[in-house]
Amino acid sequence: MARRDSEPRVLRLGLGRLAALSLPASKPEQVAALSPAEREVVRLALGGFGNGEIAELRQTSLRTVANQLASAYKKLGVSGRSELANKLAE
């Protein structure tokens, strides 16, 4: 059955992927520098979601997700996901 544009898209995820979907409360000053969209994208990235999955979940383009992550990385002074995870876990 074909999906109509009015039907919501559903991304099926394994249950294990949903465990780490919160930003650390111990870093409020760093997280506060991010826009709400950047916080959400960072939260999902830290949860193990790829850019394509994040774009699907947020119903945005892959480029938008990449730009939001790049902006968050710049604000937090990191160059990638592993540095991001380490910085917020310190």
Image: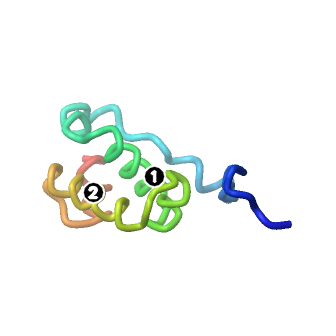
Instruction: Examine the rendered structure and indicate whether residue 19 appears above or below residue 14.
Output: above
Q: Which residue is drawn at 24% across and 47% down?
A: 90
Q: Residue furthest right?
A: 1
Q: Which residue is label 2 attached to?
A: 84
Q: Considering depth in this image, is 42 or 9 the residue closer to the camera?
A: 9
Tell me if mark 1 has few (under 14), some (14-19) or many (20+) residues whose alpha carbon lies within 10 angstroms of its own.
many
**Whole-percent x, y for residue 24 in the image:** 35, 38
What's under tag 2, amino acid-wise?
Leu
Disc 2 and disc 1: Cα gap in Å? 12 Å
| Secondary structure under the numbered disc 2 in the rendered image | helix
- Which label sits on residue 44? 1
**Whole-percent x, y for residue 60 in the image:** 45, 57
The colour scheme of the drawn protein is rainbow
| Secondary structure under the numbered disc 1 in the rendered image | helix
Residue 84, by quadrant, is: bottom left
Tell me if mark 2 has few (under 14), some (14-19) or many (20+) residues whose alpha carbon lies within 10 angstroms of its own.
some
Q: Report whether 61 appears left or right of 33.
A: right
Of labels 2 and 1, earlier in sequence is 1
Q: Which residue is drawn at 17% across and 50% down?
A: 76
Q: Considering depth in this image, is 74 or 67 the residue closer to the camera?
A: 67
**Whole-percent x, y for residue 51 in the image:** 43, 66
**Whole-percent x, y for residue 57 in the image:** 55, 54
Rendered-image quadrant of the N terminus? bottom right
Instruction: Examine the rendered structure and indicate whether residue 34 appears above or below residue 78.
Output: above
What's under tag 1, amino acid-wise?
Leu
Q: Which residue is drawn at 13% across and 55% down?
A: 77
